[in-house]
Amino acid sequence: MTIYIYEKENWTDFTWDDKKVIIKLGEARNKQGRLLGKMESLGFELQNEAVLNTLTLDVVKSSEIEGEILELQQVRSSIARRLGIDIVKLWILIVMWTE
């Protein structure tokens, strides 16, 4: 069972080791840069797909923390519509690219 930080007793009184956090933050930043570099080589449509997937999962998982379960495809469709992404066109391009 996943335990969220706010579920722990005295969760607001936590401490950390600055040196360890800096190291982990540096590693994450390096991986982020590598990922962004790879995304640039994918092309605009696949970048849109990656952004759409990331935002969709973020919304769904954040809602789960609050105890609300959302339908993944409905969230994805709503986000795509708000971003002006044509999901059908995007899906066709991805299928063509992966064949």
Image: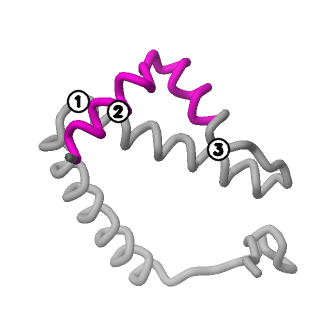
Residue drawn at x 85%, y 54% is: 67
- The residue tagged 2 is 48
Instruction: Tell me if label 3 and label 2 are in contact, CB under 8 Å.
Output: no
Query: Nearer the observer, disc 3 or disc 2?
Result: 3
Q: Where, by quadrant of the figure, is residue 46 drawn?
A: top left
* In magenta segment, residue 93: yes
Closer to us: 80 or 3: 80
Q: Secondary structure at mark 3?
A: helix
Q: Which residues are magenta?
A: 75-98
Instruction: Tell me if label 1 and label 3 are in contact, CB under 8 Å.
Output: no
Q: Amino acid at mark 1?
A: Phe
- The residue tagged 3 is 72
Q: For the residues marked 1 and 2, what is the alpha-carbon distance in whole angstroms?
A: 6 Å
Instruction: Tell me if label 1 and label 2 are in contact, CB under 8 Å.
Output: yes
Q: Is residue 53 left or right of residue 4?
A: left
Graded by Cα atoms within 10 Å as few (under 14), some (14 to 19) or many (20 or more), the crowding at tag 3 reads some
Graded by Cα atoms within 10 Å as few (under 14), some (14 to 19) or many (20 or more), the crowding at tag 1 reads few
Residue 3 in picture, x, y percent from top left: 76, 77
Residue 24 in picture, x, y percent from top left: 38, 76
Graded by Cα atoms within 10 Å as few (under 14), some (14 to 19) or many (20 or more), the crowding at tag 2 reads some
Disc nearer the start of the sequence (3/2): 2
Q: Amino acid at mark 2?
A: Asn
- The residue tagged 1 is 44
Q: Secondary structure at mark 1?
A: helix
Q: Is residue 99 left or right of residue 78?
A: left
* In magenta segment, residue 51: no
Q: For the residues marked 1 and 3, what is the alpha-carbon distance in whole angstroms?
A: 23 Å
Single out the residue that lies furthest toward the left.
Answer: 41
Q: Amino acid at mark 3?
A: Leu
Q: Is residue 92 left or right of residue 57?
A: left
